[in-house]
Image (cartoon, grey):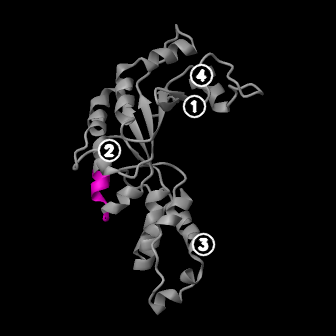
Amino acid sequence: DFHDALTQVPSSDILPPSISASPLFRLPRDLRLQIYSLLLTSTEPILWPTEHASHNLDPQLLRCCRPVYEEAAHVLYQTNTLTFAHPSDANMFAHALSNRSFACLIPHITLRVRSNDTRLWTGWFNTNAAERSLVRDLPGLRRLTIRYRGPRWQPSLNEKANADLWLKDPKLQEIILSVRKCVAEVRLLLCVRLPDDIAEEIKRGLGQTEEGEEKMPHVMFRRWVWLNGCHIRVEPLGKDDDV
């Protein structure tokens, strides 16, 4: 969050004349922070690691000078949403940080979890080992989004029956039970290839009446619903989509 980043900016009242006289540092600190945010915040989640993808970020700004680094580095880590497709990627990211205190500033990440990899993820969720665990790697995490790939649409069942079947998936239950111990807020997206008519209706947001109530039997297909201690919603996948 932008204002959370502001609270983390350290004091830099005493600056060398060459820096204090610059147009940037003649601006109020909150305006400088807005500039940093424009240069260091992506509007899209950042999949890590990804080669040759800038995400319209300008991290070279941090090499400008020490005062800029001290102010702007916090923005980079607090305002972007990192996405990881394997627990080892998240672990390596945390340990590769030039300053481990930055790991405490990351408030939200997204994990792309396939049902076949459940045990890889729950091993990372369940342990408290200093060298490799979610709570040790990212101790400041407040919200976690999981994009779970595994449920399949059964044409012989209606929406509610399909959703009920997905929620009984033992691998999904294992994920939920494990991750709830690590993070205060969990959002779970069930990524499913749906029939075209249902997927299009969801994407167009036509699933609610004027009173805002659900037309279809199960709310998971139209908006977030609180189940099993986390927020759950179905996300339609296109033919070429991946989690």
Circles 4 and 3 in contact, beta carbons < 8 Å: no
Q: Residue 97 lies in magenta, yes or no?
A: yes
Vertical relation: 222 (above or below) 10: above
Q: Looking at the image, tell me whether mark 4 or mark 3 is earlier in sequence order.
A: 3
Which residue does the image show at 25% across and 39% down from the upper left? 127
Q: Mark 2, residues whose alpha carbon is within 10 Å: few (<14), some, or many (≥20)?
A: many
Looking at the picture, how far across and down is residue 146, in whole percent?
43, 36
Q: What element carries label 3?
A: helix
Name the mark nearer the viewer: 4 or 3: 3
- Residue located farthest toward the bottom when viewing the structure as drawn: 17
Looking at the picture, how far across and down is residue 227, in whole percent?
50, 26
**Closer to the camera in the image, 100 or 98:** 100
Residues at marks 4 and 3, CA–CA distance in whole angstroms:
46 Å
Residues at marks 3 and 2, CA–CA distance in whole angstroms:
34 Å
User: Which image quadrant is residue 198 in?
Assistant: top right
Circles 3 and 2 in contact, beta carbons < 8 Å: no
The residue under label 3 is 31
Q: Mark 4, residues whose alpha carbon is within 10 Å: few (<14), some, or many (≥20)?
A: few
Give the main secondary structure, helix, strand or loop, of the magenta stretch: helix
Q: In the shown orientation, is residue 87 left or right of residue 212? A: left
Vertical relation: 16 (above or below) 69: below
Name the mark nearer the viewer: 4 or 1: 1
Residues at marks 1 and 2, CA–CA distance in whole angstroms:
25 Å
Circles 3 and 1 in contact, beta carbons < 8 Å: no
Circles 2 and 4 in contact, beta carbons < 8 Å: no
Q: Looking at the image, tell me whether mark 3 or mark 1 is earlier in sequence order.
A: 3
Residues at marks 2 and 4, CA–CA distance in whole angstroms:
37 Å
The residue under label 4 is 196
The residue under label 2 is 134
Which residue does the image show at 42% across and 54% down from the upper left? 106
